[in-house]
Image: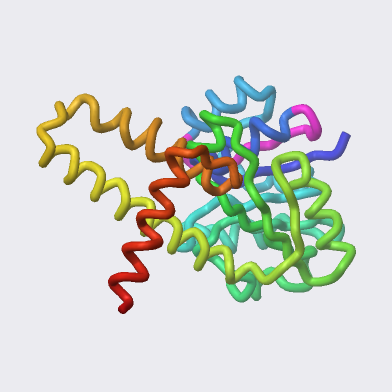
Amino acid sequence: METLAIIGTGRMGSLIARKLQSNYNLILIDKDLRKCGLLAKEVSALATADYSFLSHADYIITALPAQAFQKAIPDIKAYVAQHQVLINISTDTEMVTFEPLKGLCKLASAKIIGHAQHMTTTGELPLILVDGEDSSVRYKTAEVFSKIGTVCFGDEKIVKKINNIASEEGIKAALNIKKRLEKANVPSEYISFAIRNVACGTMNAFALGDAGPFVQKIIQKLTANEKTDSN
C-alpha cells in the first residue's frame, strides 16, 4: 500500500484523512500534536511534527493556509524527492507558491469546491478541480482524489472565485433570513433550524433540480419581481 502524508490537520486535512484512511498508509504532520494524535488514533495513522517523515511518502498533501505554507517550505524542501507528488489543496495558495520546490518533486493541486464541515456532517459529494505540471501528475492526483469526490481537470484559480462568491452569497442569505425572522418575532432558538434545515435544504433541492411545487412558486415570484425591477 502506498503512503500518503498530510501536512495540516484542520477541517479539510482531517476530512481527507478520514476519506483516505482505507486506501493509504497515512502520516499526519501538524505542530499541534494533541489534535494530530487524536486524529491519527481515529484513522490508524502516524502522528508527528517532524517533517523528516515526508521522505517515506509517495504523495504529500499540503492542507495549510497561505501564511503557514510559506513558513513550511524550508522544512518540506529538505525532505521531498523526485518520485513524490506534492498536492496543494489550499484555495489561498496557487502553483506559483511552489516555485522553491520545482524540480525537487512533482507538483500538483487539487482544489475542492465544497465546505469541509458540510461534507463531514452530510456526506455531500464535492467537486475537485485537479491541475498539475504534466498529464501523468494530473492523473495520479485525480486517482487520489477520486476517492473523495468527483474529479475534473482545470485551472485552479477558478475555485477560489467560486468558493468566495458562494460563501459570500450564502452568508448574505443567512443574515437576511435571521433579520426577517427576528422582525417577525420568531424565537431566536428557532432561527438556526430555519437556516440549517429549511434554507440549506431548499438551496440543495434547487441545485439538484429537485425543487418541489412550493419552491417553484417562490422561484416564479422572485423571477417576476426581478423583471419588474429591471423595467
Asked if 175 appears above or below 77 in the picture, the reply is above
Quarter-of-image position of residue 42: top right
Determine the residue positioned at 42% across, 54% down. 220
Q: Is residue 178 left or right of residue 12?
A: left
By what rule are the colours in the image chosen? rainbow
Q: Nearer the viewer, residue 187 or 10?
A: 187
Asked if 53 appears above or below 107 in the picture, the reply is above
Q: Nearer the viewer, residue 48 or 146?
A: 146
Q: Is residue 32 left or right of residue 108?
A: left
Q: Nearer the viewer, residue 44 or 79?
A: 44
Task: Assess whether residue 206 is covered by the magenta stretch.
Answer: no
Q: Is residue 219 visible?
A: yes
Determine the residue positioned at 54% across, 30% down. 122
Q: Is residue 30 visible?
A: no
Image position, residue 202 (x, y; %)? 45, 40
Magenta extent = 22-32
Q: Nearer the viewer, residue 45 or 189?
A: 189
Residue occupying the far bottom of the picture: 231
